[in-house]
């Protein structure tokens, strides 16, 4: 099976712009989660989708949003970019939302805001 | 709120020496606990989870509910074990909560 894929892999944006990141989960996986990874804060949860519904949301401002499509592919959007949004954004998919729980991570999208 | 603490940012050991990566959590119930590993230029991947009581690549981790710990151990470190290790916790259907990670460096 192909792994989780994320596009684009690298992105450079300027402050005030918006950005959309895409994630394709492993075939058959219905749960997709997004994380922000930075050297200072480590991995911080953004949101989780299951069957097109947002199930959980992390403690991020409303500028961060996401959605999931009927084919389980997911996108996250960040509007009005700030310098502090520079990070590696990881997507992870899971075959189920119950125990045993296992997430499969994508390679990430490296976002740089200048 | 659940919290996962990995007290060491960096741990350096010599090849062949025992390794223990510490993880403490704050949650009074029965969480699911995991160790994830990220090798250089590779994606984050699951190493092991406490419910499986498995040994992967020679690593084991025992859940100690009394001490709320889930330390990762390996009797003899190898150079290929050098990586970033993250401890994570999950309760019910809540998202995974990760510690800030420990970078393990195995010196030849």
Image (spheres, rainbow, N blue to C red):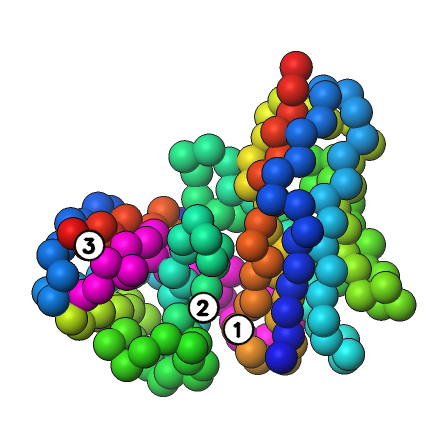
Mark 3 touches mark 1? (CB < 8 Å): no
Residue B93 lies, in percent from the top left, at 57, 80
Mark 2 touches mark 3? (CB < 8 Å): no
A83 within the magenta span: yes
Q: Depth-wise, is mark 3 or mark 1 nearer the camera?
A: 3
Q: Secondary structure at mark 2?
A: strand
Mark 1 touches mark 2? (CB < 8 Å): yes
Which is more N-terminal, label 3 or label 2?
A: 2
Residue B59 lies, in percent from the top left, at 74, 40
Question: Disc number at residue B95?
Answer: 1
Q: Identify the subunit bearing mark 2.
A: A
Magenta-tinted stretch: A81-103
Q: Which residue is mark 3?
A: A113
For this orientation, the residue located farthest to the top is B108
Q: Secondary structure at mark 1?
A: loop
Question: Disc number at residue A45?
Answer: 2
Q: Give the Cα separation between the discs numbered 1 and 2.
A: 7 Å
Q: How busy is the neighbourhood of tag 3: few (under 14 within 10 Å), some, or many (20 plus)?
A: some
Name the foreground residue: B68 vs A15: A15
């Amino acid at each position: 099976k192909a792994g989780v894929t994320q596009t684009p892999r690298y992105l450079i944006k300027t402050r005030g712009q918006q950005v959309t990141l895409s994630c394709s989960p492993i075939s058959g996986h219905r749960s997709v989660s997004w994380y922000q990874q930075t050297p200072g804060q480590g991995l911080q949860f953004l949101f989780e989708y299951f069957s097109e519904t947002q199930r959980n949301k992390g403690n991020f401002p409303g500028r961060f949003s996401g959605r999931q499509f009927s084919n389980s592919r997911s996108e996250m959007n960040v509007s009005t970019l700030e310098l502090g949004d520079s990070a590696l954004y990881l997507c992870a998919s899971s075959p189920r939302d119950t125990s045993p729980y296992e997430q499969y991570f994508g390679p990430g999208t490296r976002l740089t805001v200048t | 709120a659940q919290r996962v603490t990995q007290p060491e940012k960096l741990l350096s050991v010599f090849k062949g020496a025992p390794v223990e990566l510490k993880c403490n959590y704050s949650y009074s119930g029965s969480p699911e606990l995991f160790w994830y590993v990220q090798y250089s230029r590779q994606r984050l991947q699951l190493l092991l989870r406490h419910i499986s009581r498995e040994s992967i690549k020679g690593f084991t981790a025992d859940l100690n509910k009394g001490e709320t710990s889930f330390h990762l151990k390996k009797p003899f470190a190898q150079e290929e074990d050098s990586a970033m290790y993250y401890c994570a916790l999950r309760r019910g259907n809540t998202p995974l909560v990760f510690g800030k990670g420990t970078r393990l460096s195995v010196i030849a």
